[in-house]
Amino acid sequence: MARIGFAYNLKPEASAAPGGRPTERPSGEDAGAVLADEEPPSTGTDHMIPPVPRPAVGAAADGPLLVEEMPADDEFAEWDTQATVDAVADALAAFGSVIHLEATAEFPERLRVERPDIVFNMAEGRGGKNREAHVPAICEFFDVPYSGSDPLTLSLCLDKARTKEVLSYYGVPTPAFAVVESPAALAVLPPGLRYPLFVKPIHEGSSKGITERNLCPTPADLHAQVLFLLESYAQPVLIEEFLPGAEFTCAVLGNGAGARVLPIVGLNFEALPAGALPVYGFEAKWVWDQPDSPLDIFECPAPMPHRLRRAIETATLRAYRALGCRDWSRVDVRLDADGAPNVIEVNPLPGILPDPSDNSCFPKAARAAGMSYAQLIQSCLTLAGERHGMRLRRSRA
Ligand SMILES: Nc1ncnc2c1ncn2[C@@H]1O[C@H](COP(=O)(O)OP(=O)(O)O)[C@@H](O)[C@H]1O
Ligand SMILES: [Mg+2]
């Protein structure tokens, strides 16, 4: 019977602090970059971001609410809930004994002592822009096989601009872009960038720093919003051409020639409040999607012509391979003005909320492919085992 290590970051219990926020933080250096890339639960009650929208200056009185910035203390939004940890552990138990290895400061020593046959990794890490690489790097240090992408790919995908550089090198369509590290750099933007432009902090996820104001129709809007983001998020800002077409997110499972795209999830922006921009940003994830009125924005499989589906799948798999993704990942895609799929970003540690009502995209795509939640987790681990020449046998169904 195999010994399966299970690495995760359990969300701290909501404390007595205002808003139910945790009182303890990890000793991470770069607390501003602790969020990852995932979609929020629409019905979950335990996510940590309390909705505190503030009307933006100049918002139309009857238009949708905008927010100027994320509330503070959202560091743990992407760590896992007890329900997710339990559901994944239950799925892994089909292969043998499950050793819980929470990615705390004790993780390296526990891994060294326990030496599981393989680790199922879903740990977001302890902070900083290389946070997702921590657990895989420690596994490599102790020569313990693990599931999912390696530290290089995980860190690369947490840098939206480096990701696009690699995609561009391999000819994977991604919007034209520039990176601005200081206000002075705004004066020397590449001349070819076409308005409207869309801006985002380079190392964030969960739509942190992405509001409707990030769509900049004019140079004056661009300057104002870039300055705001540079100041608020203390990291470079990515400036991209805005893709006006439909949006999709694509779950990929497998390796090499066996990598396949599960049924594509489409975003139906009609579900947003009237007048909202077709952007899956902070407002859509954290303000308009509430437990008592979930936003019904995802459609899977997304209806589309066969040719478009093939084009999206091709772009997705090319991105997956170009970035060196392994076992699984989720790729965000949008259509340009000509209807051609462009890759926006790649998420090698996809969100996997177990409750179907939580609208988590990867499990949703797996269900549409006829896989249960347990089968999805087990497939990921089996793929990792195969990469290491291990045949994991189920000791129970
Ligand atoms: N170049 C772009 N053109 C149009 N919309 C974009 C562009 N980049 C991002 N968006 C919108 O912003 C959302 C969040 O951007 P994304 O890069 O996926 O960040 P996150 O890591 O927060 O998910 C996307 O789902 C999409 O709706
Ligand atoms: Mg995204």
Image: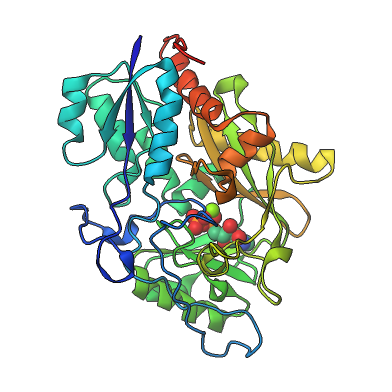
The answer to whether 377 appears left or right of 21 in the picture is: right
The answer to whether 106 appears left or right of 375 in the picture is: left
Q: Residue at x 47, y 12 (%)?
A: 394
Q: Is residue 234 visible?
A: no
Q: Residue 45: x and y, percent? A: 45, 58
In the displayed structure, would residue 275 be above or below residue 161?
A: below
Q: Is residue 197 visible?
A: yes
In the displayed structure, would residue 302 be above or below residue 69?
A: above
The answer to whether 126 appears left or right of 96 in the picture is: left
> In which quarter of the view is residue 195 placed?
bottom right
Q: Residue 361: x and y, percent? A: 58, 45
The answer to whether 175 appears left or right of 112 in the picture is: right
- Name the residue nearer the viewer: 207 or 196: 207
Q: Residue 128: x and y, percent? A: 28, 52
Name the colour scheme: rainbow
> In which quarter of the view is residue 86 placed?
top left
Q: Residue at x 66, y 71 (%)?
A: 277
Q: Residue 323: x and y, percent? A: 49, 37
